[in-house]
Image (spheres, rainbow, N blue to C red):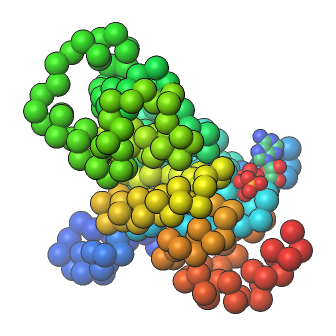
Amino acid sequence: MIAAKAEIPGAPVHDGPVADRRIEPAHKPILYLEEVTVSFDGFRALNALTLYIDEGELRCIIGPNGAGKTTMMDVVTGKTRPDKGTAFFGQTLDLLTLDEPAIAEAGICRKFQKPSVFEKQTVFENLELAMRTDKRVWTTLFARLTGEQRDAIHEVLETVGLTAHRDRRAGELSHGQKQWLEIGMLLMQEPKVLLVDEPVAGMTHQETERTAELLLSLEGKHSVVVVEHDMEFVRSIARKVTVLHEGSVLTEGRMDEVQNDPRVIEVYLGA
Ligand SMILES: Nc1ncnc2c1ncn2[C@@H]1O[C@H](COP(=O)(O)OP(=O)(O)OP(=O)(O)O)[C@@H](O)[C@H]1O
């Protein structure tokens, strides 16, 4: 079921020439979470969380353990249903009416911390499998690719820096390369929003740097939400940073601003 976003108080309205001028195209939200509350046995993992993500932006979400970062991603992807609040994708798609596959189909993809690739298939084949709607390995590998599909795979290989490894089995790749391959597999689905959970955990310094470049290169083409504990990494990619604490937004802003915010310092030192 599709509900109308315009019914939400304070939500931007895009349906007329005057309304259009109210929003800068560069700051048009694609994801709206408003007053979202999730309780587990009375404990509020999310507490009236309100968060907007703009189209094409790269947003970092930080916060001490238990702040609600994972729960927030679970709500967006349909894994967890909030007790209260609203979650919209764009102006019209009510995420709370959709299940996980429908949300992924709509263009919200999630990269979990642990890479999950088809180890026995090559890098190229993994990307091919990710592109198809028919997920049966057998069917996919024996279907012929169109020129356009090949181009799409080559473009993603370039983006994730794995062109030279296209014919290697995924199982032979390093941890970092597997992570990039999985990001590539998500890119094959042309997501509008990419949620990335601790992308550099377990990576070498060099792999971390390369991951920063990769995520920065996605900016403008996709909205990328990165949840990460590694502050040096966050600093290297951060545009706008949102600090979660006890299920709500504590503060948002540039990395230097949030780092010097006494409330943020207190929360991290107290954690
Ligand atoms: N299924 C659940 N049942 C009970 N409590 C839960 C459940 N999922 C999360 N919580 C609790 O909700 C709070 C928020 O958890 P969440 O995993 O969202 O935090 P986080 O910011 O991702 O933390 P971390 O950085 O440690 O991963 C925590 O106190 C956690 O123990």
x and y percent of residue 200 in the render? 59, 55
x and y percent of residue 45 in the render? 76, 54
In screen coordinates, is 176 left or right of 163? right
x and y percent of residue 23 in the render? 31, 78
Q: Nearer the viewer, residue 148 or 270?
A: 148
Q: Which of 1 and 61 is in front in this view?
A: 61
x and y percent of residue 80 in the render? 64, 41
The residue shown at (57%, 42%) is 175
Q: Nearer the viewer, residue 207 or 48?
A: 207
Q: Is residue 147 above or below residue 218?
A: above
Q: Which of 76 and 158 is in front in this view?
A: 158
**Would you identify the image quadrant in which residue 81 lies?**
top right
Q: Quadrant of the N terminus?
A: top left
Q: Quadrant of the C terminus?
A: bottom right
Q: Which residue lies furthest to the right in this view?
A: 270
Is residue 177 visible to the viewer in this orientation of the structure?
yes
The residue shown at (43%, 40%) is 181
The residue shown at (23%, 42%) is 154
Q: In this view, does 73 lie above or below 246?
A: above
**Total count of labels:** 0
Q: Is residue 140 above or below residue 167?
A: above
Is residue 72 visible to the viewer in this orientation of the structure?
no
